[in-house]
Amino acid sequence: MSLLKNLLQKSKQSISLKLDNGRLDYCLFEPSISAPTISAAGVEELSQEALETEFKRIINQVDGKGRDAHWVLPTSSYRLLTIEKPAVPDEELPQAIQWQVKDLIDTSLEQAVITSFDYPESLAGPKRLFVVVARRDEVMQIIELSKESGLELKTIGIEELSLGQLLSEQLSDGQNLAFIAESSSGLTINCFLGHEFVFTRSLPNVYLPDDDPELFLDLDDAQPNAATDSDDQWLLEVQRTLDYYESQIAKRSVTKVVVPQLGKSTETIVSSLESNLGLKVEVFTFADLCLLSDGLSEQKLSKHLTVCGGCLGNTERPNATS
């Protein structure tokens, strides 16, 4: 925890937020040299007709006003593309990217916010870029909501990179890591090579085995896990995904799988992955990064992974030389 303490020494209190079709997911982070802490996390339903008023009320209710705000766009609000890097000077790159993606998106360039980040250079093939295309009106809504509710807007990120921030202690040079997590709609698998994001896949209506029904009593998990064709369906889909990633993307084997702490079912999940897929599996815990306030648990926060990662958006990512 010492590295994170040093990074947060001069940081302000922060709040991370994700707004997805009227559902507001939030996490509050208290930076402190002695004990950096996640103080609150939860989800609220907002009426679209009174979105601004209700958002402001919730920010005041959770003591969010005046904090640094780090927003995480939900996957429904953006497209993540991979393109060959245009062979142009750096100052011409933004315009070249726009022209390259204009026929790949379902909105006009005027209605889009487009940004990019590096594709891992260690992977074979031509130089590539990840391109994020978000709707301009949704980005402007975030800016307006932050301004009107007294938040200090610092960053607007995406779920894949937010998870990378969350997993900073697990990521290391030379490691080919897959992170398997779960939302109310199904599994997501995100892969990282070293500290760099490489690949993501969503598996709608595919869920991890659940031995702890209390995990699904929170508002953001009002619908219980959908039934799958068999108890091993999740294993089959994970194996198919990792096989594709290894053979078509990374061209190398996954060296480690990470899963969040999910209560009673965690041991079963880890055992199934290790015995059936022959993979080394580690369990991610927030205790490796910070403290948790009373009322919060690893299991509860496992349902807020991307937004909790957004709270670490104002820290530098550790590297091998840190």
Image (cartoon, grey):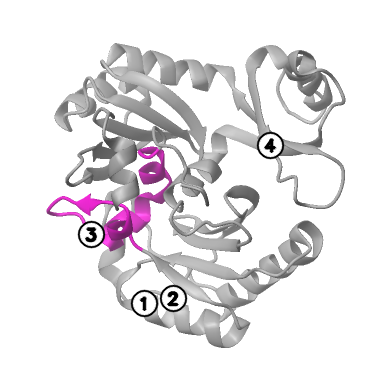
Q: Are marks 1 and 3 in contact (CB under 8 Å)?
A: no
State whether residue 237 is above or below residue 277: above
Residue 26 in view here? no
State whether residue 148 is above or below residue 76: above
Q: What residue is rendered at 55% in x and 33% in y?
A: 77
Q: CA distance from mark 1 to mark 4?
A: 36 Å
What stretch of residues is rendered in magenta? 285-312
Residue placed under numbered mark 4 in the picture: 118
The residue closer to the viewer here, 165 or 157, is 165
Q: CA distance from mark 2 to mark 1?
A: 7 Å
- Classify residue 148 by image quadrant: top left
Q: Are marks 1 and 4 in contact (CB under 8 Å)?
A: no
Q: What residue is rendered at 83% in x and 25% in y?
A: 100
Q: What residue is rendered at 32% in x and 28% in y?
A: 47
Residue placed under numbered mark 3 in the picture: 297
Q: Assign a secondary structure to mark 1.
A: helix
Numbered circle sitting on residue 149: none
Query: N-terminal of the two: label 2 or label 1?
Result: 2
Query: N-terminal of the two: label 2 or label 3?
Result: 2
Q: CA distance from mark 1 to mark 3?
A: 15 Å
- Amino acid type at image mark 2: Pro
